[in-house]
């Protein structure tokens, strides 16, 4: 009997000991997007903090493709030892399951939420070759040139796709979708004038907007963004239905021990509170969150249902 009790205590202590020793080797932060997007920028900010705090490298592993599904699937199949973590935008965790294609994972069962990292509004931008200087002018130009304008996205089912589809639906304009493997490639096509319209989170866009390389027409936040005071909101532009923020979360493989999830959560929250991370997020129009794993799990369940409703409203389809 005594031996059984001692064994039970030792089993209970092992995960805690592992959490205290963590990490024992480099930690891979899988960003389910190519370099250059907001998720990538956020991941790199956090990786710098982790490498200093853990005394082990935190390595960014960009796994773009299939609108984030490839990178997400890699994490669901990784060893649940805390050394592989997903940094993701909503798409592969919410909307993709409603686009008619069976996912290789269940985001609500195969991943363990760690924390909601940050939220950020998007900005509606157009290529400099588009003559429109406002949303009203963009709609008028699109109606005068049906089928001529394109909108790009970081992948089918991602927020940039849904926002573009909603713009087409609400404004009743004929614009066509050009999906990419991530925000970085989509942005490059916008800068090159190969596509015309792009909704993308403000943090990745602000330097380009200020450099005059793209033209911002509206932001999706409820209020104007202080860093772009002359850019109206979508509501001020007459399209209040298109108004939402994009969020970013951290998740681990589903069977990661609770003690390790608790340790990872603590480390993520500490990194988010670092002054240079806070300053970078604030200057980019993003806001850190850092809620508990339980809060993020509940948030994720709500977002899955919201995604189902949003897809119906947007008319977005997988190309």
Image: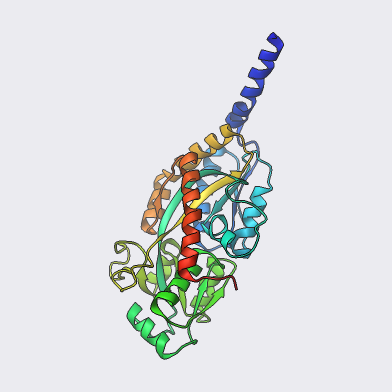
Residue 109: % across, % down: 61, 46
The colour scheme used to paint the residues is rainbow
Looking at the picture, does residue 244 appear above or below residue 197? above
Residue 64: % across, % down: 62, 62
Residue 63: % across, % down: 63, 58
Closer-to-camera residue (283/165)? 165
Q: Look at 41% across and 49% down and name the residue there.
A: 288
Residue 118: % across, % down: 44, 51
Going by the image, does 294 lie left or right of 228? right
Q: Which of the 4 image quadrants contains residue 18?
A: top right
Q: Which of the 4 image quadrants contains residue 12?
A: top right
Looking at the picture, does residue 86 appear above or below residue 7? below
Q: Quadrant of the C terminus?
A: bottom right
Q: Look at 54% across and 39% down and name the residue there.
A: 264
Q: Which of the 4 image quadrants contains residue 21?
A: top right
Closer-to-camera residue (55/145)? 145
Looking at the picture, does residue 14 appear above or below residue 107? above
Going by the image, does 137 lie left or right of 307? left
Q: Look at 44% across and 90% down and name the residue there.
A: 145
Going by the image, does 55 lie left or right of 223? right
Q: Quadrant of the N terminus?
A: top right
All told, the count of numbered labels is 0
Q: Is residue 174 visible?
A: yes
């Amino acid at each position: 009997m005594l031996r059984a009790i001692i064994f039970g205590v030792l089993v209970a202590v092992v995960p805690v000991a592992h959490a205290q020793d963590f990490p024992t080797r480099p930690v891979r932060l899988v960003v389910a997007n190519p370099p250059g997007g907001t998720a990538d920028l956020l991941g790199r900010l956090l990786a710098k903090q982790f490498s200093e705090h853990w005394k082990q490298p935190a390595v960014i592993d960009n796994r773009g493709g299939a609108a984030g599904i490839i990178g997400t699937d890699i994490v669901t199949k990784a060893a649940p030892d805390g050394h592989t973590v997903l940094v993701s935008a909503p798409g592969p965790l919410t909307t993709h399951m409603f686009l008619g294609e069976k996912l290789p994972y269940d985001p609500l069962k195969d991943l363990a939420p760690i924390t909601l990292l940050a939220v950020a509004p998007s900005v509606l931008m157009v290529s400099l070759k588009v003559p429109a200087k406002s949303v009203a002018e963009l709609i008028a130009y699109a109606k005068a040139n049906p089928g001529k304008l394109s909108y790009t996205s970081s992948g089918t089912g991602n927020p940039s796709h849904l926002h573009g589809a909603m713009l087409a639906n609400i404004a009743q304009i004929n614009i066509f979708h050009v999906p990419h493997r991530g925000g970085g490639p989509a942005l490059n096509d916008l800068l090159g004038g190969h596509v015309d319209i792009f909704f993308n989170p403000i943090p990745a866009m602000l330097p380009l907007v200020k450099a005059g390389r793209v033209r911002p027409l509206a932001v999706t936040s409820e209020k104007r963004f202080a860093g772009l005071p002359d850019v109206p909101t979508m509501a001020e532009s007459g399209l209040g239905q298109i108004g939402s923020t994009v969020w970013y979360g951290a998740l681990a493989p589903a069977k990661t021990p609770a003690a390790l999830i608790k340790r990872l959560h603590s480390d993520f929250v500490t990194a988010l509170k670092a002054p240079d991370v806070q300053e970078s997020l604030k200057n980019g129009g993003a806001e850190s969150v850092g809620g508990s794993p339980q809060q993020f799990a509940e948030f994720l369940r709500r977002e899955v249902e919201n995604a189902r409703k949003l897809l119906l409203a947007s008319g977005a389809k997988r190309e």
